[in-house]
Image (spheres, helix red, strand yellow):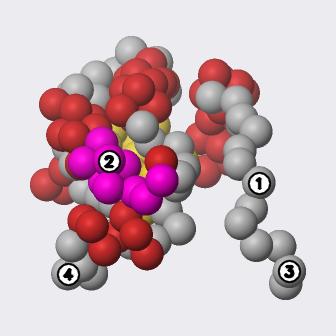
Amino acid sequence: MTGSSRQSLDWIAKNSDGWLTYPEATANESGPQMLGHKISAWREKIPNGMFKPHMTNEWIDLVEDVNYPRTPLRGGYILRTGRAGLIQLLEEWRAVGVNHAALGIHFSSRPPAEVIQELAEEVLPLFPTHVGPKPLFTGW
């Protein structure tokens, strides 16, 4: 399920396979905390304690300065940050229950190959893939 499509949280919890929501603000920890409240409220309504993943996303401009502070651009729709700030954001998301994160880089001021290489070498190893639950249905 993406967003809420005007459905109630009860409906989303019962009928979705997972939930993709807007990340709230990402320039400081208050956004991930708000996102965490939303995720917790949804998960409390999921029948029988079943696991359903939560996903979120962010458009990033990953700059070369590792310690460049998390700075919102274009009204908060893009996050300019250094690697340390991105890692901190991903850790905050993980702590509040985000299971999958999509990072858009097409607004990046650096060449995409450089950004992808930095993400692959310096960020992704800190967030390994975990074994998930078995699929409910595999007959396709």
Check disc 2 and report the residue beneath it: 44
Residue 73 appears in view = no
Label 1, secondary structure: give it: loop
Label 3, secondary structure: give it: loop
Label 2, secondary structure: give it: helix
Q: Which mark is residue 6?
A: 4
Q: Image height check: is 2 above or below 68?
A: below
Residue 133 appears in view = yes
Q: Image height check: is 112 above or below 95?
A: below
Q: Residues within 10 Å of mark 2 (few under 14, many from 20)?
A: few
Check disc 3 and report the residue beneath it: 139
Tell me, yes or no, whether the highlighted magenta stretch contains residue 69.
Answer: no
* Mark-to-mark CA distance, 1 and 4: 30 Å
* Mark-to-mark CA distance, 1 and 2: 21 Å
Q: Residue at x 53, y 52 (%)?
A: 50
Q: Position of residue 106 (x, y in %)?
A: 48, 60
Label 4, secondary structure: give it: loop
Check disc 1 and report the residue beneath it: 134
Q: Quadrant of the C terminus?
A: bottom right
Amino acid tagged 2? Glu
Question: Who is closer to the viewer here, 57 or 1?
Answer: 1
Q: Residue at x 46, y 31 (%)?
A: 94
**Magenta stretch: helix, strand or loop mostly:** helix
Tell me, yes or no, whether the highlighted magenta stretch contains residue 40.
Answer: yes
Q: Residue furthest front?
A: 48
* Mark-to-mark CA distance, 2 and 3: 29 Å
Q: Which residues are magenta?
A: 39-48
Q: Residue furthest right?
A: 139
Q: Position of residue 75 (x, y in %)?
A: 13, 54
Q: Please state if 112 lies on the left or on the right of 43 as rendered.
A: right
